[in-house]
Image (tube, helix red, strand yellow):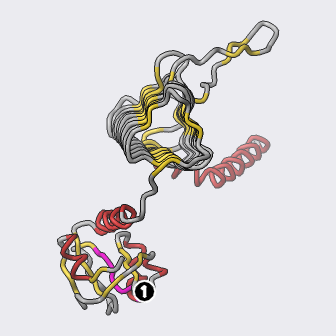
Amino acid sequence: MEFSASQIAGFLKGEIEGDPDVRVNNVAKIEEGHEGALSFLANPRYEHYIYTTKSSVVLVNKSFRPAGPISATLIRVDNAYEAFALLLNIVAQSRPVKKGIHPSAVIEPSAVIGSDVYIGPFAYIGEGCYVGDGCSVHPHVFLGDNTRLGRNCTLHPGVSIYHDCRIGENCTIHAGAVIGSDGFGFAPQSDSEFMKIPQLGNVILEENVEIGANAAVDRATMGSTIIRKGVKLDNLVQIGHNVEVGENTVMAGQSGVAGSTKVGRNCMFAGQVGIAGHLKIADGTKIGAQAGVPGDIRSENSVYLGTPAMDHKQFLRSFVVFKVLPDMKQKIETLEKEIAALKGEG
């Protein structure tokens, strides 16, 4: 697809600075720009690239004020990052969509398949499954018995969804993710061995959920593990049994939530955040990378950092002390020697 700067500006309701007729047919990071590419500048740390980029068109915020000459045509918009994401969505949606059922797919007789679906090679659809209209089930996907997919879901290659799970409309699950595997439930015995506790519940993903590659969402021991609408989980995220994740919460890679914890709405977890079990995390909580949360977070819209996690203001004050601990230790040792010498003189 090819667009002129004026067409893009018209779609985004942006303001052009430069050649309105210049055309683009690709996208690129601003530091890797080339002729015919569209880029964007949102982070001030990347501003120096805009003066040397070879991209033909660059989206910038309306507030941007250049410090030098720029060869690219600029399109000023309210939010360059959001505008660029919108254009990427348009490009993605313009790609051809596969339809039809591959002859090597195995579909049990009691399964119900909607219209306009794609079921790829070697996919398996179990007894009593329901696949909604417009779904794409890519090669080697496994759907256990009585699993239901809402309309317009996309399951990428190698996804496994165990029996009795419920997937809402417009969900995307990336390659290798596992939905509905057993929760980590084992009862200690008197002989120091562990007896497995049967996991009899299921997993419910509400609408517009996205699950990253190789993530795992465990089924509940009883009842349901619930991922509410709009949640986005990155690659390698682990959600334990009976967890509930609130609407529009996002978690970055390698984060983990232990069993029976309730995570609120609109929360943001950075990479490798660990949440202990049976906790309550308030709506709007933001947790920094590698933080470990051992207890409830009850205040909404709070920011936590560190291990054990603490309020970010307290953490930053503590961090000032952490950095000078070696010097403090040396001063204390020096003072101890001086005190010992004074005592010896006495």
**Rendered location of residue 63, percent (x, y):** 22, 74
Tell me the element at label 1: loop
Q: Is residue 229 left or right of residue 332?
A: left
Give the magenta-colored segment's residue range: 52-60
Q: Quadrant of the N terminus?
A: bottom left
- Which of these two is toward me, 237 or 111? 111
The magenta stretch spans residue 56: yes
- Which of these two is toward me, 226 or 318? 226
- Which of these two is toward me, 346 or 302? 302
Q: Is residue 331 left or right of residue 226?
A: right
The magenta stretch spans residue 93: no
The residue that disc 1 covers is: 53
**Rendered location of residue 81, percent (x, y):** 33, 66
Bin the neighbour count of mark 1 within 10 Å (Cα to Cα): few under 14, some 14-19, many 20 and up: many
Q: Quadrant of the C terminus?
A: top right
**Rendered location of residue 162, percent (x, y):** 57, 30
Q: Is residue 18 visible?
A: no
Q: Is residue 216 visible?
A: yes
Q: Is residue 267 left or right of residue 140?
A: left
Count all numbered tags in the image, as a single digit.
Answer: 1
Residue at horizontal 32 percent and vertical 35 percent from the top: 300
Residue 126: image quadrant is top right
* Residue 58, above or below 243: below
Q: Is residue 264 left or right of residue 103?
A: left
Residue at horizontal 29 percent and vertical 75 percent from the top: 60
**Rendered location of residue 329, percent (x, y):** 67, 49
Residue at horizontal 29 percent and vertical 66 percent from the top: 83
- Which of these two is toward me, 52 or 206? 206
Q: Amino acid at mark 1?
A: Thr
* Residue 49, above or below 133: below
* Residue 69, above or below 33: below
